[in-house]
Amino acid sequence: MRILRFGTRTWLCGAVYRAQFAAWKARLPGNDVLRTWGSGPLSPALRRAARTLPADVVAAASLPLNHLHYPVGRADGAPVVFLPAAHTGDRWGYERPNLVRVLNRGAATVPFTAHERDWLAEQGVRPERLHVIPAGIDTGAAGGRRGAFRAAHGIGTDDTIVAYVGQHGSHKGLDTLVAAVPALLAQRPDAWLVLAGARTPYSDRLAEQIAALDPAARARVVVRHDVPAQEKAALLADTDVFASPSHAESFGLTTLEAWDRRLPVVLGDSPSQREIAGAAAAFVAPGDAAALAQTLAALAADAQRRARLGEAGHALLQARFTRAAMVRAWAELLRGVAAGRARAAGAAA
């Protein structure tokens, strides 16, 4: 494996930042292109590499970013496979005809779910080029010593830990989790909320929201930035309920990591999450802090239900979402795309 990294330019993104929202609101022609420039990234070096590096197949991810354009139209005709990872509920971010045109120039597009596939088809992506491949993880190797995270952060052995692990994205429902803390503590005074994951520009806003809590609630929130794998494993080993109440989600890989631990999972209610988890998770309406607090408190009080949900999630993980199954599906698709290119070249000759 060879990894290349390229710098980006941000001046154009900043220049069109406000204009893109105005153009979208007024539904002006070309607002989709303006929004894509605003999203970035702009990287001439990456564009050159995407068009010139030797390749049998080029894979590009993800919507709604500008660099999806880069590998299309290579001089050598190398086919492109797209991984859109579309948040189908986010109209501003993902309803962009210019990107649909890009996807239709590829050899294949790979949604995570049937819901995402159907949504892409409704947007105009050619149905025959849509191939659903769910995400997957390696199972059974999570590690982590029970009690280590609790001891490191002064959390009692019988206290309830509600954890979120993942990037601090504005769409992840972290604002709802923080807003739910006072109501959760009113029902479960032993509860803690732990937010662990990659720092983003949204992290500062999240810190402001936590700082605005009353002192008692604020003292029960632990934030860990950019956690190493060992600390992440220790946290999940000590977690009682895993919560990811996203406002928009294409898949949710951290759900699989929680299921590998047989943890009960609480998710934001959306078509993609319903398709993935079914009866193996509890669902709350995105943004409903009161309902989230009630659901978390009910799970904290019901060890048998937590165990049932955790076992159901673990069984679903083993049946549908292993890395081995994902790799087999991707390998078959990529071999087929490469073989199609070879056949086309032979016919042209």
Image (cartoon, helix red, strand yellow):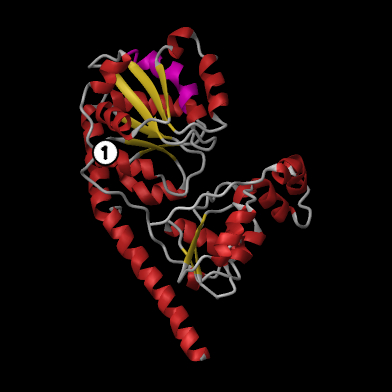
- Please give the count of numbered marks on the rendered protein: 1
Residue 130: say if magenta: no
Residue 184: say if magenta: yes
| Circle 1: residue type | Leu
Write the start and end of the magenta stretch as one range: 177-190
For the N terminus, the image quarter is bottom left
User: What percent of the width, then of the height, locates residue 196?
Assistant: 40, 29
Q: Is residue 30 left or right of residue 220?
A: right
Look at 56% across and 31% down and name the residue there: 202
Q: Is residue 187 left or right of residue 120?
A: left
- For mark 1, what is the residue? 309
Magenta stretch: dominant secondary structure: helix
43 vs 291, nearest the viewer: 43
Query: Where 232 falls versus 114 (above or below)?
Result: above
Look at 49% across and 90% down and name the residue there: 347
Query: Where 1 falls versus 210 (above or below)?
Result: below
303 vs 160, nearest the viewer: 160
